[in-house]
Image (cartoon, rainbow, N blue to C red):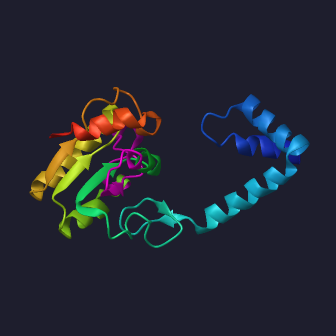
Amino acid sequence: MSKDLISQLIDTLRCLPGVGPKSAQRMAYHLLERNREGGNKLAHALVEAMEHVGHCRICNTLTEHDECEICSNQGRDGSLLCIVETPADVLAIEATGYRGRYYVLMGHLSPLDGIGPEELGLQKLADHLDRGGIDELILATNSTVEGEATAHYVGEMAHKREIRASRIAHGVPIGGELEYIDGGTLAHALAGRQSV
């Protein structure tokens, strides 16, 4: 027997990070009792995003175009390439005034979870580096064990190609994630980056 529509809605909302059973229930009842128009807009936006958002062919971030806004902007410094884990990290670094380009890994190396270089798609990054024109890689992965391992691996890729690699300074707390760091701290970390 299939679940009723309300239970399906509650279960579906639980797919969001940090949303447990009670939060999902509260959201579902709020939409149904007080904001059906908002619920319909949310449903439409979700369908559109799921159907039309993909990855930028250059930097791998999420976009609804072949190239994202940053990659198609000729005013950006193509000699600087900032390596981040997620599209949210791009937004955090953009708030600092950084004017280079990005490469979004969409994760980090995690052998315990079965995520190695192949699963992370690091060959696409290697191909990007082999095309030339990049003078420095800024390694801005999270300050977690996995983020540090990923930074080390990507730094070695850069060294093999004689590209300077730097790591953002440790103004970012150990165990922190970039999307939750304030702009001033992140700007300081970028300014104090060092070679690896």
Q: Can you see residue 20?
A: yes
- Answer with left or right where residue 83 lies relative to residue 63: left
Q: Can you see residue 3?
A: no
Magenta stretch? 93-119
- Answer with left or right where residue 157 lies relative to residue 12: left
Quadrant position of residue 187: top left
Q: Nearer the viewer, residue 11 or 174?
A: 174
Q: Residue reaching furthest bottom?
A: 66
Q: How many marks?
A: 0
Q: Residue reaching furthest top?
A: 174
- Tell me residue 2's x, y (percent): 86, 48
Q: Relative to residue 194, is residue 155 depicted above or below?
A: below
Residue 48 drawn in magenta:
no
Residue lying at 61% horizontally and 33% vertically, measured from the top left: 18
Quadrant position of residue 17: top right
Residue 101 drawn in magenta:
yes
- Tell me residue 139's x, y (percent): 26, 45
Residue lying at 17% horizontally and 48% vertically, measured from the top left: 165
Assign the C terminus to one quadrant of the image: top left
- Tell me residue 174's x, y (percent): 33, 26
- Tell me residue 182's x, y (percent): 43, 34
Residue lying at 31% horizontally and 32% vertically, measured from the top left: 145
Residue lying at 26% horizontally and 65% vertically, measured from the top left: 128
